[in-house]
């Protein structure tokens, strides 16, 4: 009976140590990802496209509103270089949720962002805000890399100028029709 109690006690202690170890690894991974995103925000503030792109894996995908998905670190760097050359460009994001898989090799963050960029057509600064989800993979050296970065804007897209003109034209045509109908009715009386 003493052997069974000793065995159960040893097993219980081993399980507690394992649970505490995984919790501390989990906590360390969560902190590492929070630190990663803090530094990433600083890279954006410095408009350092090379440092920003270095945070993506070689097979990463970046998805932003109004653009097709950008696949691969080289294509992401090219897009980031163009984006960071905009004098008005400013990006800040903050995770409200950080989740790390039990396996410790995958994670994601979810949060909000605020972005300012110059519209290439109007040359006016456009202020955007919305939500993002970034998926991470731990690489062999123990650091994290973004593998999928997706942003969704909360700002409604602008009404195209052609649609505005068409709407204005329809309203003008409708007003002319109403006016002509009223004019005909008044002549019949």
Image (cartoon, rainbow, N blue to C red):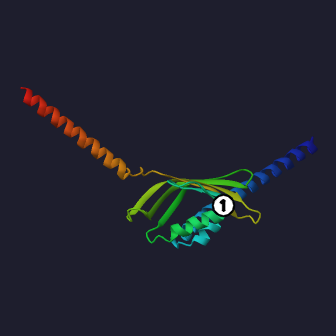
**Of 36 and 15, the residue lying toward us:** 36
Quarter of the picture containing the C terminus is top left
Give the x, y percent position of residue 49: 57, 70
Quarter of the picture containing the N terminus is top right
Residue beneath label 1, please? 72
Q: Is residue 152 above or below residue 86?
A: above
**Of 103 and 90, the residue lying toward us:** 90
Q: Is residue 102 above or below residue 174?
A: below
Q: Quadrant of residue 176?
A: top left
- Which residue is rendered at x = 83% and y = 51% of the image? 14
Q: Quadrant of residue 71?
A: bottom right
Q: Does dot 1 land on a helix, a strand or a loop?
A: loop
Left or right of 30? Residue 151 is: left
- Which residue is rendered at x = 60% and y = 61% of the image? 34
Left or right of 40? Residue 187 is: left
Left or right of 174? Residue 40 is: right
């Amino acid at each position: 009976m003493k052997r069974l109690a000793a065995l159960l006690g040893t097993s219980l202690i081993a399980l507690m140590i394992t649970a505490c170890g995984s919790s501390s690894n989990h906590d360390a991974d969560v902190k590492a990802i929070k630190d990663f995103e803090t530094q990433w925000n600083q890279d954006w503030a410095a408009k350092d496209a090379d440092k920003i792109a270095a945070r993506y894996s070689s097979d990463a995908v970046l998805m932003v509103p109004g653009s097709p998905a950008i696949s691969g670190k080289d294509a992401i760097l090219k897009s980031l270089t163009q984006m960071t050359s905009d004098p008005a460009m400013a990006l800040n994001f903050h995770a409200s949720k950080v989740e790390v898989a039990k396996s410790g090799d995958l994670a994601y963050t979810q949060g909000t962002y605020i972005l300012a960029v110059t519209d290439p057509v109007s040359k006016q600064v456009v202020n955007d805000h919305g939500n993002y989800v970034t998926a991470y993979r731990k690489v062999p050296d123990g650091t994290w890399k973004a593998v999928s970065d997706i942003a969704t804007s909360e700002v409604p897209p602008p009404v195209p100028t052609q649609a505005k003109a068409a709407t204005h034209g329809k309203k003008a045509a409708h007003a002319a029709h109403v006016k002509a109908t009223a004019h005909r009715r008044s002549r019949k009386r």
